[in-house]
Image (cartoon, rainbow, N blue to C red):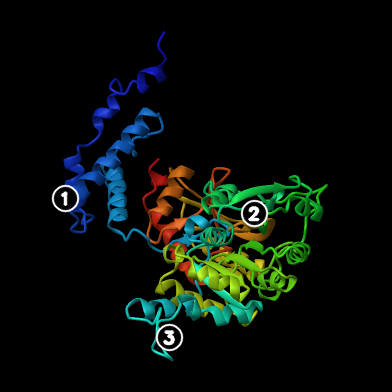
Amino acid sequence: MESHTGKLRAGSSNPRLRELPSVGRICDLLVQHHAANNAPRSLIASSARRAIDAARERIKDLVADDITVSEERITGQAARYLQRQLRPPLEPVINATGVLIHTGLGRSPLAKEAVDALVAVAGSYAPVELNMDTGLRGRRSDLVQPLLCELTGAEAASVVNNNAAAMLLVLSTFAQGREVIVSRGELVEIGGSFRLPDVIEAGGAILREVGTTNKTRPSDYTRAINERTAALLKVHTSNFRVRGFTEAVSIAQLAELGRSRDLPVIHDIGSGLLDRESFPGLPDDEPDARTSIRAGADLVLFSGDKLLGGPQSGIIIGRRALIDRLERNPLMRALRVGKLTMAALGPTLQLHRDPSASVPVRAHMRTPIDELRQRAKAIVSEFASDARVRAETVETQAYLGGGAAPEEAIASCAISLRVHGVSEDELAQRLRLGTPPVVARINEGAVLLDLRAVPHALDRQLADAIRAVARVAPDVARE
């Protein structure tokens, strides 16, 4: 005997599918309700069609109620789709995920000083490759090289478009067709399925693994060195930790070996910590650029958009002779950064002269938990009389993210949000598609809005976003 579920999933046998409005009807309603915003008819129609298709799938999946297939509900969904298509492709969002350096959300936000400088340069000409003293052509990296040298103690510096590009350029320059020695315990995947062995291969170098996953000694490197060896490479395992029966070679030990064999030592520290004083509270094993240079590393590589808090970039510091060779590599032209990156990077580095300066990611990490609790309670109190909204403050944990301190949780406070008649998945989607967009996380049937990475100035916008999604929820009194 065929089950009731089977009949409904047959699609055409479900009479409720015939209740769905036509595309033309939803288009007319969008225009009548002034939701079309003078959009092209093709966009209006595609938004209507998408909303109807979503309602059709919900009916087939047995999750629709009478309100879900109503013209009003479908028109509202179509309006949200349409508004999304009319927005700029990239726009600001409120990061309520609890991840401070969120790769999917552009990693670290820029400081106000960097934003102001970027805006000023964006609408104007700027001397990206012009030495204003001599009137002659200069190098782009010269714009920030003095600052990087001042902050890290390096002799010279260069900037490319991300840290993977920095590694690619270094390997292409110094290890083309030759071996690079790396500990097996440091063969990381850096995210997005990009793996260090693949980057080494793309750079034209040959990977020579030494040691084991959990134990690598100086003698392992020594035995591996031969006439084909081009460099010794140390990579910070920024997104995982190996605990227990372990042993690793320090950058100081590796630098000493490199000097004795006349081999350059390259240290990829990953997340862009300039020095310990600039970011207190991190684990002791998080490497910093200044310490690595002092320990004797010939080249140090790191990201500009993580702990540094600047724009996406890859920064290379170290010995002047090596940096000069990098700058002369033809690949540099393909990997160089533009004026907007330089405009934002300069002020960011200037802020790092003062350990107490307000770099946003550092400020978010330092916000007292009591302050987050008070802010969460204030937002929750605004919905105490709204029967459609169930909001409460909850203790939670945030994370630095961006491959930094993967095991170090940061005490945080969040708003646990439920809206009557709206599933947690739909609620999260509505928040993402709202104005302003809010990106949160789902936990145990509720949407969690973690305040750790939300600036205090955005609390009003966050409350308005909650109010907007509650406004289209079913009326409790009518059910």
Please give the residue where the numbered disc 2 appears in the rendered image: 180
Q: Where 149 falls versus 212 (above or below)?
A: below
Observer-nearest of 136 and 244:
136
In front: mark 1 or mark 2? 2
Residue furthest out toward the top: 1
Q: Quadrant of residue 393?
A: bottom right
Q: Name the N-terminal-most of marks 1 and 3.
A: 1
How far apart, in angstroms, are the residues tagged by discs 1 and 2?
A: 58 Å
- Tell me which amino acid carries mark 3: Asn
* Residue 352 relative to residue 136: left or right: right
Observer-nearest of 181 and 312:
181
Q: Residue at x 55, y 47 (%)?
A: 198
Please give the residue where the numbered disc 1 appears in the rendered image: 41
* Residue 441 relative to residue 218: left or right: left
* Residue 177 relative to residue 250: left or right: left
In front: mark 1 or mark 3? 3
How far apart, in angstroms, are the residues tagged by discs 2 and 3?
A: 37 Å
Q: Is residue 415 visible?
A: yes
Observer-nearest of 265 and 285:
265
